[in-house]
Structures are given as C-alpha cells and as structure tokens.
Image (cartoon, grey):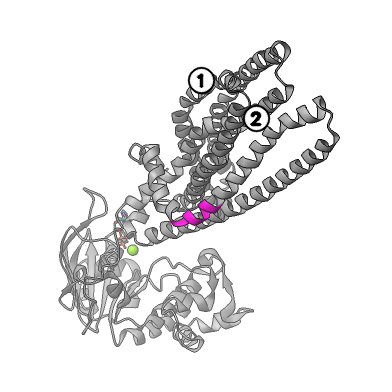
Amino acid sequence: MTVSAARTAPPAESSVLLRRLVADQGRAHWKGYLLAFVFMAAIAASTSLAAYLMRDVINEVFVARNSRAIWILSGTIVAIYTVKGLATYGQQITLTRIANAIVGSVQRRLYGHMLAMDVPFFAERHTSEFVGKLSFVATSSAAVLNALITVAGRDFLSLIGLVTVMIVQDPMLSIVGGIVMPLAVWGVQGLVKRARKIMRSEFTGGMAVLETMQETVRGIRVVKAFGLEELFRARMEGQIAAVQAAADKRARVGARSVPLMETLGGFAIAGVILYGGWRVVSAGETPGTFFSFITALLLAYEPAKRLARVHVDLSANLVGVGLLYEFLEQPAREADDPNLPALAVSGGRVEFADVRFAYREGEDVLNGLSFVAEAGKTTALVGPSGGGKSTIFALLLRFWDPRSGTVTIDGTSVDAVSRRSLRARIGLVSQDVFLFAGTVAENIALGRPGASRAEVEAAAKAAHAHDFIAGFHRGYDTPVGENGLQLSGGQRQRIAIARAILGDAPILLLDEATAALDTESERAIQEALAELAKSRTTLVIAHRLQTIQRADRICVIEGGRVVEEGRHDDLLAARGRYARLHEIQFG
Ligand SMILES: Nc1ncnc2c1ncn2[C@@H]1O[C@H](COP(=O)(O)OP(=O)(O)O)[C@@H](O)[C@H]1O
Ligand SMILES: [Mg+2]
C-alpha cells in the first residue's frame, strides 16, 4: 500500500490549516461569502422575529381575543417565512457555486502540481492515490469553508438573534436557559481528535479500495486467465470491511455528543418551564412572554447544537485539507526551468562518460558506463535483460539524473539545458506503448500537437500503420479505449512509431520498438525505421540481433557497463559476448 497518508508527518494543527485555507480560497470568494452572509443574516432575522411574535400571538389572540390581530399576525408570519424561504434559496445557491468553484480551483492546482513532478515521484506511487486525492481533497476543502460559513453565518447569527429575543422577553429566564451551554461545548471537545484520526484511516482505506478496483480493471485478463476472482474478492472484502468499520466508528464518535446534548437541552427547557411557569402562575406574568421565550429557546436548540459540534465536523474534513497542503508543499521537482537555455542540436552526438546510477540506494544499475553514439549514425544497445539499457534512455531524457558521470549531447550536458527543449529534440518509441483515450489520429498527433490530418496519415503510412488503420470501420477516427487495449501489441507499436515519425526529432530512441511485431511487418518497419534513421542520431535497443546487424556500432551492455563494442562482423570475429549472444539466438 503506497498511500501518502500512511507515511506522512504528524498533521498540522487544525487552526493553521483553516487559516491557510481561508487565506487561499476564502479571500478569492469574499464577495460571494459576503452575499451568502447577507442571506444568512436575513434567515437569522426572520427566525428571531417569528419567535418574538409569539408573545403577541399568545397575548393578543388567546388572552385579549383580538380578532384583527389574528389577521395582522398571520399576514406577518407569511411574510417572514417567505423572506426566510427566499433567503435560504439565495444562501444555498451562493454557497454551492462557491463550493464548486473551490473544488475546481483545488483540482486545477493539484493537477498542475502533479504535472510538475518528475518521473521518480510517479514511480513511487499508485494511480489510485491521485484519483483519490483529486476528488476527496477538493471536496473536503469546499466542505470545510462552507461548514465554517454556514455555522458562523446562519447558526451563529440565528443564535444571537434568538438569544436577544430571550433576553428582551425575560433576562432572568435567559440565565436559567443558558446555564447549560458551557457544559455542552465542553462535552464535545474530546471528540475532535478522535474524529480526525478515524477520518484519516477511512480515507486511507478508501484509497486501498480504489487501488484494487483499478488494478482489477487493468489486469482483468490476468485475473480471469488465472482464475483469481476469489483471491481479489477476498482482498477487496478486507479493504471494504475496514472502510466500513472506520465509517461506522466515525458515526459513533460523532453521535456520542447527541445523548449529552439532548439531556442538557431537556434540563434547560425544564428549568425554563419551572421558573417561567412559576412566574406566570404566581407572579402574574403574561403567558405571551413565556411562550415567546420557549419558542426562541426551542428554535435556538438546533443551531446551538451545530455550533457546539462544528469543531468535530470541521476537523474531520480538515484531514483532506491537510493532504492538499502536504502535497502542494512538496517541491515541484520538475518545475519549469526558464533560466536554462534551450538545447541546440547540431549533429546530435550523444555521449555517456563514466555514468553511475542507482534507482535505489545500494543497487547500482549503471557502473561507470561510457559510450558514444556518433552524430547521424545508428548505435545499437544489446545485452541481457536487466542490464540497464532502458535506463540509459531514461537518463538521456532526464527522467532520472545520474549519481556521477556526464551525459552530453553535442558536448552540452543534458542538465544544463531546459528539460522541455531536451525532450523536444528526442523522439522515443518505448518498450510499452501507451495510448491515451481518444481516436487513432489523435494518438498519432500527440507526436506533434497541431499536425494536420494529412501529416498524420503520412506518418502512419511511413510506420506501416495506414493499412490496418484504414481497415477499421471508422478509420483514423476509431476510438482507442483506455490504454488502447483493443489493439494488438504490434499495432500499438506502429502507432507509437508513427508518433515518433511525426515528431521528427533529430535524436531517435527505439526501445525494443519492433519486439511485438511479426516477422512480416517487422521487415517492412525495419525499412521505414532505416529510412528514418538516415538523417538522425539513432539509438536502438533490440533483443533480436538480426534487426541491428546494419548498425554503425553495437554496444554490448552487461551489469551496467559496456563490455564490448564494434560492428557486427568485427564483434562476431572477436568471438566474445556478442558472438555468444548471436550463437544463442541463431544456433
Ligand atoms: N523505476 C525503477 N525503479 C527501480 N528499479 C528499476 C526501475 N526501472 C528499472 N529498474 C531496475 O534497473 C535494472 C535495469 O533495468 P533496465 O534498464 O530496464 O534494463 P534493460 O532495459 O536492459 O532490460 C533492472 O534490475 C531493473 O529491475
Ligand atoms: Mg528494457
């Protein structure tokens, strides 16, 4: 399980996160929040006014039996509730719009930051982590701000209004009713930390579910072919059960305040009835005051409850906000490097000099590797799998940086130029071809965004892909689904080659580019690639040695260094490693 939540430093203080979120997002939407606040003030005012009017309802209608007052009061109540309805509508619309805007802006920021990360960052993580973050983190940021504003706005203002009504009606009664408030606030404080912890484990568990789900979809053929359904079902079962348990626990902890709050509420109301009733019965107080007071008290109950536990709800959602800042705080390891000059390729001579590199500490992959790929020539890299050939390409493209030694193009070190310009001048057909959701034509056009349909077709023809594409019912407009899985390996590879042809970069990297092709199409493509290689520096990694016999130079790579190099015939004559490999393949 590779979820960042599991390996992060202790979470930041709620108040710090909250302040940061308000500074980041709240400020951008202050006008909207102000409007929502006005609506909420209207809600609070109408609620309080309704409670206040109860005195007249009781005194005029029930005590004085004033029939004119019946009409006036009912009319006023209708007006008050109409205002309240409209204000609630306005508040909901305003807050939802702001929430949507925040979700959008957080997602844009997360995604932008994600793109600025380098390849190792992604190599350490599972896709589900990003999917989970993008949705959970964004919605929780919006939820926090909106909870804050509804509680601070609607509930707090309502409470102020209603308490004012209570005090106006009977100050002494207010003290009786309000005496339980501090108790209630104290009662929920202890729940905050627990809610937060549980939310974190709920999120981590949710990510595990996503992870299994995605792997099942991507590896569905393996799952089916090996009959792994039960195994996966069991794995998923455990993960779902964990999330369910965490969610249940959070509900339990959250609800733990309910009995306390209800009991305290009961005491408050009972106290008011005792004292207020006594005043009406023996001191001759009007029943209107008493009823108005009770109404205000009852109406104040819900907002007071929400206000008392706002901490608990906020802190649960702040888990997501914490994850957001945790991620944004990681330095953009591959941020734009506009200060660096663009790479200028004159001939395209590639040189590796005494390069040492390890993906993981202590597991050296390249051990002082040196070789030269001459400008405009084809250099082949061969050798046993795991020897470090693909790694050489990764270093040339600066997906990773070597620990020591230099990688240069025309004498310029690759880390002295901007990554963007470096990669723009290198074409890559990699071992595993990735096709994006979209049409065949769109996938080829990724080689050079903005290419015309005619250029796309010309590239496809050169890559010997045109015939099979034209054979599709919808031709170039055939959609290729996720990862292009409905195409054969050879077809995918030819699309990747067409991409590279379209890109027309001065340096071309082919990593087992023809491995998935049958002999027939391979021969055709070999010719296309030979044509392509003519005018540029080409590095070819190949398992099948007949594909590289015509290379200008062959480097045999083993254990992270070049153990032999030369032309095909010379290497055969030398009877060394290459001759051995050749013998194994051709008998
Ligand atoms: N992203 C990675 N993280 C860690 N180790 C890797 C990674 N990619 C490759 N390796 C390891 O580096 C070694 C060389 O891999 P690679 O360059 O792909 O070999 P080749 O292309 O010659 O088959 C292998 O032992 C492989 O396990
Ligand atoms: Mg490889």
Q: Where is residue 184 in the image (x, y as percent from the top left)?
A: 53, 23
Does the magenta-highlighted stretch encompass residue 297? no
Q: 189 or 386: which is nearer to us?
A: 189
Q: Position of residue 444 (x, y in %)?
A: 47, 78
SS type, badge 2 = helix
How far apart marks 1 and 2 lie (CA) works out to: 20 Å
Residue at label 2? 296
Q: Which amino acid does label 2 sit on?
A: Ala
Instruction: Give, as a single range, the part of the protein colored magenta.
Output: 28-35
Q: Does 438 appear above or below 187?
A: below
Secondary structure mostly seen in the magenta stretch? helix
**Which of disc 2 and disc 1 is earlier in sequence?**
1
Q: Where is residue 53 in the image (x, y as percent from the top left)?
A: 71, 34
Mark 1 Cα shell of 10 Å, populated few (<14), some (14-19), many (≥20): few
Residue at horizontal 29 percent and vertical 58 percent from the top: 333
Q: 163 or 105: which is nearer to us?
A: 163
In the image, which is nearer the foreground, mark 1 or mark 2?
Answer: 2
Q: Position of residue 483 (x, y in %)?
A: 51, 64
Residue at label 1? 183
Does the magenta-highlighted stretch encompass residue 29? yes
Q: Does 75 appear above or below 130?
A: above
